[in-house]
Image (cartoon, grey):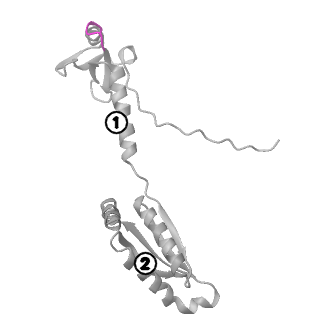
Amino acid sequence: MGWRSRSKAKMKPVVPKERINREITATSVRLIDENGNQVGVVSLGEALNKADRANLDLVEISPNAQPPVCKIMAFGQYHYQKERKMRESRKKQHIVQTKEVKFGPNTEEHDYTFKKNNALKFLAQHHKVKFTVRFRGRQLAHKEIGFKLLEKLVEDLKDYIDVEHQPRSEGRTIFTIVSPKKDIDKLLESKLEENKE
């Protein structure tokens, strides 16, 4: 029987759940009541009774403290807020990728403009861009053409980019790496406004 690959389901990040009520194993805890007041160190039984009387949960919020810190609160609501904060922080994270845009030393103007605009789209998405000029055969004798092409690109995009790696030669290619300016969104917006006028 042949080997079959199994696709992995997308794992949802798990919000670690605190121990609550009878899951708590410590014999005594440092208690914070439902109003946020420090009650002090009490037995687990006493803390559970106080939580019961308040119709709330006893939540172990600092398990590594000596003794563990527990708070009386509505756990469902607390856990929901915590999950929401995690989702919000994940939304704000942006994974920066390096996109490559390739040219030949004899790239025509139309093709050059098309590729430059593509690079601008990547920059607008806050990705870095690696511009590569690839040489074949006898073209290698004219590397200065590749350097001029990259200089032209950097000049044309100078309002939107910071150069991370100056153009350099590596084997049959010359490349440069650029990253978007921090305020690229505003820069592109004002460019759009100019074009409308």
Q: Quadrant of the C terminus?
A: bottom left
Q: Residue furthest front?
A: 197
- Is residue 87 shown above or below 145? above
Q: Which residue is mark 2?
A: 153
Mark 2 vs mark 1, foreground winner is: 2
| Amino acid of disc 1 | Lys
- Is residue 48 shown above or below 71? above
Say the numbered circle drawn on residue 85: 1
Q: Nearer the viewer, residue 182 or 35?
A: 182
**Residue 113, horizontal then vertical, whole percent:** 48, 75
- Categorize mark 1 by other alpha carbons within 10 Å: few (<14), some (14-19), many (20+): few
Queried whether the magenta region covers residue 53, the answer comes back as: yes
Q: Residue furthest bottom?
A: 141
Say the numbered circle drawn on residue 148: none
Q: Magenta stretch? A: 52-56
Q: Nearer the viewer, residue 141 or 39?
A: 141
Q: Residue at x 49, y 36 (%)?
A: 12
| Amino acid of disc 2 | Leu
Alpha carbon distance from label 2 to label 1: 41 Å
Q: Residue at x 41, y 31 (%)?
A: 16
Q: Residue at x 35, y 69 (%)?
A: 160
Quadrant in the picture for residue 70: top left
**Residue 97, horizontal then vertical, whole percent:** 46, 59
Queried whether the magenta region covers residue 176, the answer comes back as: no
Of callouts 2 and 1, the N-terminal one: 1
User: Mark 1: which secondary structure?
Assistant: helix
